[in-house]
Image: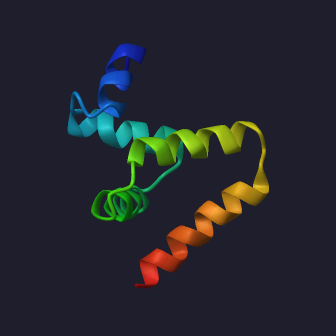
Amino acid sequence: MSQASLSLFERDESVLSVDKFFHSLERLNVTAEEYFEIYNYYYYDNFSLYQFFLDLKESYYKSDIKILSKMLNSLKIKSRC
């Protein structure tokens, strides 16, 4: 997938084909269930899914375990509701 296609998808200006979508999830090591849980959590609570992934990427590259743990815990707490 090209950088331009990914950028359009991230900005919700385009959709991925099903095969590209699942291939992308595999490369990110994310299951479809995990993706949709995160998507629904942020979509229905009016948070920005795009911002969530920006924060996730930044924390990952900085190896900021504290922030990554907080993000994970917030998702676990929300999934119990």
Q: Quadrant of residue 21?
A: top left
Q: Quadrant of residue 8?
A: top left
Nearest the eye: 72 or 23: 72
Whether residue 16 sits left or right of residue 42 in the image: it is: left
At x 41%, y 59%, the residue is 38
Q: Quadrant of residue 18?
A: top left
Which colour style is shown? Answer: rainbow
Q: Quadrant of the C terminus?
A: bottom left
Nearest the eye: 20 or 58: 58
Position in image of residue 36 (x %, y %): 34, 59
Whether residue 63 sits left or right of residue 18 in the image: it is: right
Position in image of residue 54 (x %, y %): 53, 39
At x 71%, y 56%, the residue is 67
Question: In the image as oriented, which residue stretches furthest toward the bottom?
Answer: 81
Q: Is residue 35 above or below residue 18?
A: below
Whether residue 67 sits left or right of residue 2 in the image: it is: right
At x 45%, y 84%, the residue is 80
Whether residue 12 sits left or right of residue 10 in the image: it is: left
Position in image of residue 66 (x %, y %): 77, 59
Task: Report the number of numbered marks.
Answer: 0
Position in image of residue 45 (x %, y %): 34, 64
Q: Is residue 42 above or below residue 59?
A: below
At x 58%, y 44%, the residue is 55
Q: Is residue 56 above or below residue 2?
A: below
Q: Quadrant of the N terminus?
A: top left
